[in-house]
Amino acid sequence: MLKLLFPALSRFRMAVQLVMLFVTVYGSVIVGTYMADKISNNLPALSCAYDQMNGGYCVLIPTQHILHHRIGEAVVRAQQLTFGMVLPLLMSFVSFFAFFFVLGKMFCGWVCPLGTLQELVGKLGRRLGFGLRRIEKGDLGEVKRVRPVKWLLLLGLVFVLPLATGLGVTPHSLGNPYCDICPSRVATTLLTGNTEQLALRVNDNVSLVLGAVANLLIGFMLVGALAIRQPFCRICPLLAFNAVFQRLSPMRLQKKMHDNCGKCGICSEACPMDIPEIAREEGRKAYHEDCTLCGRCAEYCPQDGTIQIKWGPFALFSSRRDYYKNKVKGELPDGTVKPVKFVRNAARPAADPADA
Amino acid sequence: MKRILATLGLAAATGAAAQHEHHTVAPAATAPAARAWTQQPLLLPGKLVRGERASALLRPQGLAAAQVTVYAPEGPAARLKVDYPVGADGARIEAATPKTGNYHWVVAREESGAAVRVASTAWYFGNPGDSPKELLRTPKHELEIVPEPLPREHGSYRESEKWRFLVRFDGRPQPDQPVTLETAFGSRSTALTDAAGIATVVFPRDFRPAEKKAEGGHEGHGPRRVPFVLTTVKESGGRKYLTSFNLTYGQDGDRGRSLGWGAAFGLAGMLAAAPLLRRRDKRDNNHA
């Protein structure tokens, strides 16, 4: 039955993504107002606190707030940086890790509502026949140039600026700067019919600039995702945050080297994050910091057992030649499917000259 | 399902603390008595100590109460209901335990002859704690105004919004009961409860430009908030009960914001991405 409903891993993943999109945007409708506050305060996916209908929050919020309100203010009061102050931050990370231990970076590829939105837009782009643009040499430039951005955003906007605000160095409007530029804040609230987060605060220059950046990002993301797969994921600080812990979760990507590795490159082409290492590396290097554990590389690897998604010793999915053959019949590795063609009705007879 | 949610909740709660920092629904700073905006009984906060998370100062106003009672959402049995004496500055209340957070229900009571006056409010301690669902469900005094629900974190009562409040007497919902809303900006309206005892209250769009803190506005960097009070009166058994519930409400989210500029920057982002769509992929994708 399950196999009938989900003949491919990607279809199963899309079903999970759509369910999680609903939960992370409209979750309180199901679990109730108060429970929604509690079930997933540290769900490590971009489920936005500004959305009052959702069922989950994002670990980046407490991180910014603890640095802003607790650690920074505690230092200002010239108290010792005791365990009492550091502990909340640690506890926040621990509860984040409780979730993360189970699913690892699958949160990015399977749960994150913003990731799902981008993927849906990307599918629309493929359907409409927009050419796929890749972040690789010869197209938009090497992917390694983009990779540091997520780390800089994590360091600067999630750690440094909130702490500096708590210390009184920077203005209060820089207390949660990442949330202020986060396109998920705008996207998920718009999905609930709320335009408040799209509207810019015009009476505070810092907020105005941060909000403008967020809106530029969401605009760029919505159109860019028609051509580039997962454009925002590549610079998302949550991906960097998850990457810090990715070796600590039993959920992982495992790749063995095969004679064809580095030659066919299909796995890399299938990767929505344009990770070239998946094709030419093995082991830890193949499970790259940018990996979202979406599993497309394993789906499109034509070699039996070369790429696996594993949880501890258990292989949840292994690449298989017969699976690959079936898969490419419906969708090519780069996501291309039979495009929708807008053509004139061929059955309509040519205009009768007598009508003229 | 419940067990899964409870487990997730437990895990999440440990880290929830940090999300309750800049909030939200803590009652606003006191309005000077000389400019009292209401004659109804209130519980108003004293000066907040920066960084203080497990205690607060609440001062009864408009009623003579020797103590305030704090009901906690969780904690040791002896801490679920605690009385605190009212001193010169008010009553210093505490969370059930230093690490217990979320909403606590606070009540001050005055009885004189046949009159019973009760002021109630909800205080949010910025630490993990059980949701106030059970706390609100449990009757705590005769005539009650119970928020259905209390605002979520990052949320608050706001101008132009409709919120529901249950009125019950001895634990039973009271239909056709008038509930009066007064705000620090001078608005006043009355709503009647429906058959289920629910009064739907519309918060007036009455914020004036910020002038001074005298209106009892929220001190700090968060959104501006001012107090409101809901009041209801009922006579029963020869006694007259008057109960109030006060908290704060905030500005309409659209104030100070420009949807036009927001949309303009969104469109600018779209235009910036448009060149990406121009080139069609000509590569041969035949992998089958």
Image (spheres, rainbow, N blue to C red):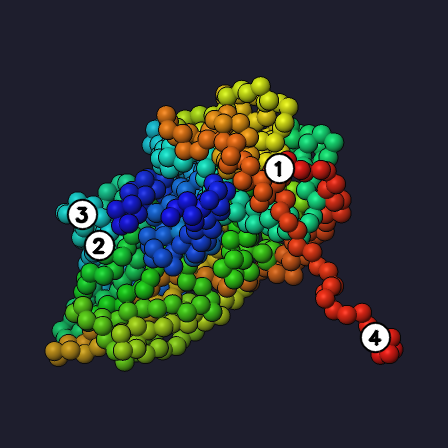
User: Are the residues at dot 2 and dot 1 in contact (C-beta closer than 8 Å)?
Assistant: no
Q: Tell me the crowding category of disc 1: few under 14, some 14 to 19, or many 20 or more residues within 10 angstroms, Cα based.
A: few
Amino acid found under the numbered disc labelled 1:
Ala
Amino acid found under the numbered disc labelled 2:
Tyr
Q: Is residue A99 left or right of residue A132?
A: left
Q: Are marks 1 and 3 on the same chain?
A: yes
* Residue furthest left in the image: B237
Q: Which residue is mark 4?
A: A352
Name the chain under label 1.
B
Q: Which residue is mark 1?
A: B288
- Secondary structure of the residue carrying tag 4 is loop
Is residue B95 visible from the viewing direction of this image? no
Amino acid found under the numbered disc labelled 4:
Asp
* A44 and B118: which is toward the camera: A44
Q: CA distance from mark 4 to mark 2?
A: 85 Å
Tag of residue B79: 3
Q: Which residue is mark 2?
A: B71
- Judge depth for marks 2 and 1 and give the one in front: 1
